[in-house]
Image (spheres, helix red, strand yellow):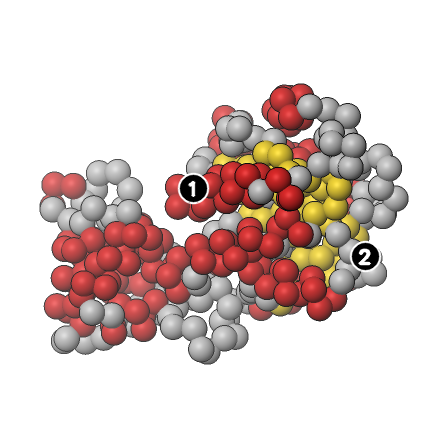
Amino acid sequence: MSGEYLPHISVLLEECLNALSIGAEGVEVPLFADLTFGGGGHSSEILRRNPHARLIAFDRDPEAIANGRALLELNGWSDRAKLVHANFDQLYPWFQANTPGLFNGVLADLGVSSHQFDAGDRGFSFRADAPLDMRMDTSDSSIDTAADLVNTLPKEDLANLIYKYGEERLSRRIAARICEKRIERPYRTTGELEEACFLSYPSHSRHKGIHPATRTFQALRIAVNDELGSLERMLAGLPNLLAEGGTAAIISFHSLEDRIVKHTYKEIVANKNNRVMILTKKPIVPTEREVEVNPRARSAKLRVLRRMENHGGLNGFTEREEESKLERE
């Protein structure tokens, strides 16, 4: 386990806060959900900027939960915020069991957190040689680690996994090398897997573009944590959780996630009983300035969904006006 929780920079912070309308008039005690608490950047700003807001925050990483509880106590927010150690696909079951009230805003910042990526012992990155783990919830021993997958999956299944979740064109070559080498010795560390990926690429292309191991590491991380399945289950329950005028703001970082958010939003809107509108026909992306300050933000895309109010409008704005408002702010 890592020691100190490593610092991070919240992606699309102002855009998210604008989308959530954290200071909206007419709601005395708004309720928000941060489904990916992480380092608490987005949550902290919600609580800081609206002293009346209540917050329910989810995170599957026990290190994030421990750090978050200390953060809430330090800032005197413990009476307004609750941390739940669970995957965000448990939002709707938790909501049904606890009935906190409908949410005025729901936020999710998908993918791996900066802490998970930078902590050398978690196995998410090949920058440091570490145990090949990649579990976001290290307390759950029932979850297969990345080492379990690379050492036990049949070659065809491993190649398909790397291609599907990593969009890696050399997935079969990489899977073949992994399976060839694991006969001699099981993979235990990120360095061993990184070497296998690196040597699977032709020598002339190993130092061009992204590192040869990047897509394979992404694929294994997504598979270990069932990230896409979790996202689909979470999104399915959203329409039942939003208060009138409430918004859902989802940040994705790669095409697989963004595609699910985009199409699920459309499916939710197609059901007229849900009474929702998409406020971002095109996703909101970081400014050039934000990318300069935080290069990890470069691939972020924010999509926003809002539940209509009883009179059929969106807080007095049309859909196009709301979209322009988000873009301006």
Q: Position of 153 compared to 7: left or right?
A: left
Q: Is residue 316 above or below residue 124?
A: above
Disc 1 + disc 2, Cβ < 8 Å: no
Measuring from the top left, give residue 281's x and y in whole percent.
53, 28
Kind of residue at disc 1: Arg
The residue to which callout 1 is attached is 259
Q: Secondary structure at mark 2?
A: loop
Res. 48 in view: yes
For marks 1 and 2, give the one nearer the viewer.
Answer: 1
Check the image and name the residue furthest to the bottom.
Answer: 141
Measuring from the top left, give residue 99's x and y in whole percent.
76, 62
Kind of residue at disc 2: Arg
The residue to which callout 2 is attached is 80
Q: Secondary structure at mark 1?
A: helix
* Quadrant in the picture for the C terminus: top right
| Residue shown at 64% from the left, 26% from the top | 319
Instruction: Give the distance between the C-alpha atoms of the residues marked 1 and 2, in whole angstroms.
Output: 34 Å
Res. 325 in view: no
Dot 1 surroundings within 10 Å: few (below 14), some, or many (20 or more)?
few
Residue 326: image quadrant is: top right
Tell which of 1 and 13 is nearer to you: 13
Sequence-first tag of 1 and 2: 2
Residue 303: image quadrant is: top right
Dot 2 surroundings within 10 Å: few (below 14), some, or many (20 or more)?
some
